[in-house]
């Protein structure tokens, strides 16, 4: 079973908001109690937080589907629904949050760093909150807004001051085991280390971390061996140490050729050219290894490397190497800009920003995009005519009707807002005030009939009677309307 995972895909679902409630108070001696429907609760959000005790993404490897709680629906007697519980996921230090297409959302470094990756939906308002002077008893309520749903990629990049790089079996695991308290697996075959190992080195008043990166081979930057999986773990290292095997028996291998091969892979991976380098020629306790180290040392020093002849078995030269590491780490820390507290940036909306845009599509339709219009559409119950009329009023007040007309929209054109499509009929809504009627209905949405209303028929009958009494050639039969013969 895997014990270390540094890349996972998470399927996140924030909680949906609860629906608002439609209710009218009915109690004895309170004939006009009014609306008392409560609001729905907000859905739970999904957040990531850096926990120093977490060192791997293993838990998410086995549980990739994450869902926060939904908000509860409102109820009568002005009872609001409960909010959904927020979900907080603990991730290791150095976790990079990306979208599926590689866009970086957050680089989480530092204990306690928090990032809200999926926001819960807003709860819908009940009819008590929607009541006003004209709409005293709304027959509708808002639906809960759906929570964010997305797939993200978590990628762990180890946070270490020093990175040990080199070919397999060069002695990196042995080296980190003797300079720190780390206990990596050590064996006499290649690719013993399958996961990065972190160790803390304490030297006098210096403390720094060292990462043992699994062995690299030519072609690692293109996916060969384990290089592509673990090269990311040296991106944050301030110092790189080449660990060279001076006692290898492989043909064509020597310290200079090994460094050239590793440097070629680091250059192809990119972003590491400015890191200071040290060279640790390991296994000098072997006679042939010491001879080879003395031969190649001048060549390496001519290239500008500081060379240390060390032995993880006898601990020869390790004190000088660790002091050199501490010196470079301190220099990098002093050169780094001082950490500044996170600033809260407020970006107010521009004065001329309407909060939405209208795009004329090639097929003759129009698409309205904006946070508020799309949210209002999601929260509208389209089975309720009064709710549809309320949505139309809100869109008209926002200016959507005017902008559609200026964009060239004609009555009957297809208008798309979010996932909903409408046949635009501006004469039904724009400039027409709400006329109270039966709850759940809107007279502006009623089908128009050619049949005269009762008031019109009464006025026509009175007019005919007046003409008959005045004797203006009216026929008695005109007094009888087929609609009134009951």
Image (cartoon, rainbow, N blue to C red):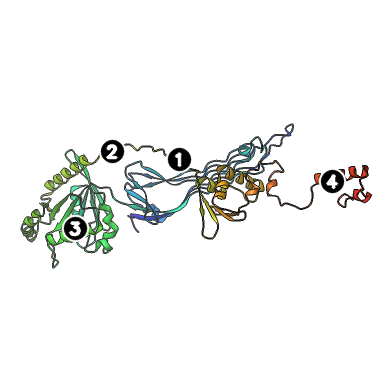
Residue furthest to the bottom in view is 251
Closer-to-camera residue (181/203): 203
**Cα separation between marks 2 and 3:** 31 Å
**Cα separation between marks 1 and 3:** 50 Å
Residue furthest to the front in view is 472
Q: Is residue 398 left or right of residue 24?
A: left
**Cα separation between marks 1 and 4:** 57 Å
- Circle count: 4
The residue carrying pointer 3 sits among few (fewer than 14), some (14 to 19) or many (20 or more) residues within 10 Å by Cα, namely: some
Is residue 215 something that shows in the picture?
no
* Sequence-first tag of 2 and 3: 3
The reply to whether the C-beta atoms of the residues labelled 2 and 3 are less than 8 Å apart is no
Secondary structure beneath dot 4 equals helix
Q: Please give the residue where the numbered disc 3 appears in the rendered image.
A: 263
Q: Please give the residue where the numbered disc 4 appears in the rendered image.
A: 460
Q: Residue at x 63, y 48 (%)?
A: 388
* Sequence-first tag of 2 and 4: 2
The reply to whether the C-beta atoms of the residues labelled 1 and 3 are less than 8 Å apart is no
Closer-to-camera residue (294/198): 294
Closer-to-camera residue (226/232): 232
* Sequence-first tag of 1 and 2: 2
Q: Please give the residue where the numbered disc 1 appears in the rendered image.
A: 350
Residue furthest to the top in view is 29
Is residue 30 something that shows in the picture?
yes
**Cα separation between marks 1 and 2:** 32 Å
**Cα separation between marks 4 and 3:** 99 Å
């Amino acid at each position: 079973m895997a014990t270390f995972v540094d890349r996972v895909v998470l399927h996140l679902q924030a909680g949906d908001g609860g629906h608002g409630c439609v209710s009218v108070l009915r109690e004895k001696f309170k004939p006009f109690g009014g609306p008392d429907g409560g609001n729905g609760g907000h859905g739970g959000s999904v957040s990531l937080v850096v926990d120093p005790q977490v060192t791997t993404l293993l838990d998410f490897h086995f549980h990739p589907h994450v869902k926060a709680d939904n908000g509860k629906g409102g109820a009568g007697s002005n009872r609001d629904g409960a909010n959904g519980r927020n979900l907080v996921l603990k991730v290791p230090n150095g976790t990079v949050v990306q979208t599926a297409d590689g866009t970086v959302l957050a680089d989480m470094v530092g204990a306690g760093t928090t990032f809200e990756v999926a926001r819960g939906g807003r709860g819908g308002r009940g009819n008590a909150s929607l009541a006003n002077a004209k709409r005293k008893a709304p027959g509708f309520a808002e639906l809960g807004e759906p929570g964010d749903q997305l797939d993200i990629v978590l990628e762990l990049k180890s946070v270490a001051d020093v990175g040990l790089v080199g070919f397999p079996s060069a002695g990196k695991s042995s080296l980190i085991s003797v300079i720190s308290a780390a206990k990596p697996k050590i064996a006499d075959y290649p690719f013993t280390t399958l996961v990065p190992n972190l160790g803390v080195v304490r030297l006098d008043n210096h403390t720094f971390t060292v990462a043992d990166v699994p062995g690299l081979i030519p072609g690692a930057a293109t996916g060969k061996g384990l290089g592509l999986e673990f090269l990311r773990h040296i991106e944050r290292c301030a110092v790189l140490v080449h660990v060279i095997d001076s006692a290898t028996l492989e043909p064509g291998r020597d310290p200079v050729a090994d460094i050239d091969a590793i440097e070629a892979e680091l250059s192809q991976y990119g972003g590491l050219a400015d890191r200071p380098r040290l060279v640790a020629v390991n296994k000098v306790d072997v006679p042939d290894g010491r001879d080879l180290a003395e031969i190649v040392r001048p060549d390496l020093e001519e290239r500008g490397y500081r060379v240390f002849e060390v032995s993880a078995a006898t601990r020869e030269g390790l004190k000088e190497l660790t002091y050199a590491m501490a010196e470079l780490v301190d220099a990098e820390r002093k050169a780094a800009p001082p950490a500044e507290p996170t600033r809260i940036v407020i970006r107010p909306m521009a004065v001329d920003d309407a909060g939405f845009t209208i795009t004329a599509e090639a097929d003759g339709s129009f698409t309205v995009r904006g946070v508020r219009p799309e949210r209002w559409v999601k929260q509208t119950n389209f089975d309720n005519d009064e709710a549809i009329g309320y949505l139309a009023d809100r869109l008209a007040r926002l200016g959507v009707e005017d902008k559609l007309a200026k964009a060239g929209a004609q009555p009957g054109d297809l208008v798309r807002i979010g996932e909903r499509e409408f046949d635009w009929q501006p004469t039904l809504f724009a400039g027409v005030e709400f006329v109270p009627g039966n709850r759940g209905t809107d007279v502006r949405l009623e089908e128009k009939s050619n049949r005269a209303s009762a008031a019109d028929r009464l006025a026509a009958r009175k007019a005919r009677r007046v003409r008959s009494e005045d004797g203006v050639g009216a026929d008695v039969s005109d007094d009888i309307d087929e609609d009134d013969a009951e």
